Image (cartoon, rainbow, N blue to C red):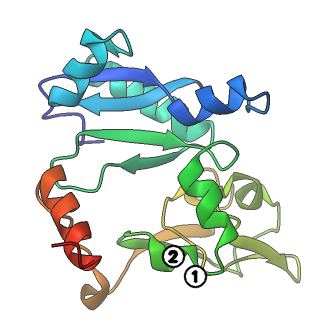
Amino acid sequence: MNIFDNQKKIALAPCICRTQAKKAGHGCDKPMEACFLFGSHASFYVDNGLGRYITPEEAKEIARRNEAAGLVMQPFNSQYAGGMCSCCGDCCGMLRSLKKQESPAAAVKSNYYAQIDGDECTGCETCLDRCQIEAIAIVEEKAVVNLNRCIGCGLCVSTCPTDAARLLKKSEDRQYVPPETGMETYLRIAQERGKI
């Protein structure tokens, strides 16, 4: 969890997706105060009454709680991330949209993917219940990962009772290096869309 170690300011804020879902009458039971902001993003949230400052140690403890609750950790897409969301498949607009796609893995920038060893899998379905993107199915009483759907979050790995689930690094030619800053991320997106 070294994303927290070098931050000068860390703020914790309620998840905007779960807040919206709750107000619309269809929220979930996942932790509400779960998303992190760093640096100037943290200052903005705290200055505007949208979050509160926390220490790196508190952030790590909250991140562990979020992972145990089955939330997908999604840092902003840059090397110096301005924050990190903690997303559920019920309320998060991004994950809900991805779940509707045939191949969510193609739309997500991740350097990892899950693999389940069929010899070690007991078919307990723990991973099936934790996968927020519906990338795991039980086939002949064993869990199988659909690599077209897996976004490499690792939720299936952390609670596998037999250690059959593993998070593997993609090959060098498939590694993604995020832009250095958030501004560079937006510039890259604009270039890819032909806007600049």
Say what amino acid the circle numbered 2 marks. Answer: Ala
To which residue does mark 1 refer?
Answer: 147
Drawn side of residue 117 relative to residue 177, left or right: right
- Residue at 23% from the left image edge and 29% from the top image edge: 41
Residue 94, position as x, y percentages in the image = 54, 54
Q: Residue 4 at what x, y percent from top left?
A: 24, 34
The kind of secondary structure element at disc 1 is loop
Q: Quadrant of the N terminus?
A: top left
Task: Using the rendered view, name the quadrant where residue 87 is placed.
Answer: top right
Counting residues from the start of the chain, the first of labels 2 and 1 encountered is 2
Question: Is label 2 or label 1 in front?
Answer: 2
Residue at 80% across, 60% down: 125
Determine the residue positioned at 66% across, 50% down. Answer: 89
Q: CA distance from mark 2 to mark 1?
A: 7 Å
Q: Nearer the viewer, residue 117 or 178?
A: 178
Pick the quarter of the image with the C terminus.
bottom left
Q: Position of residue 58 (x, y in %)?
A: 35, 19
Q: Badge 2, how many Cα within 10 Å: few under 14, some, many 20+?
A: many
Rendered residue at 46%/74% (across/down): 107
> Does any portion of residue 158 appear in the rendered image?
no
Where in the figure is residue 156, as x and y percent of width and height? 61, 59
Q: Which mark is residue 179?
A: none
Q: Which residue is mark 2?
A: 105
Q: Residue furthest front?
A: 195
Q: Nearer the viewer, residue 55 or 105?
A: 105
The answer to whether marks 2 and 1 mark residues whose Cβ atoms lie closer than 8 Å is yes
The answer to whether any part of residue 191 appears in the image is yes
Query: What kind of residue is marked 1?
Result: Leu
Position of 21 with respect to 108 (left or right) is right
Q: Is residue 182 above or below residue 62?
A: below
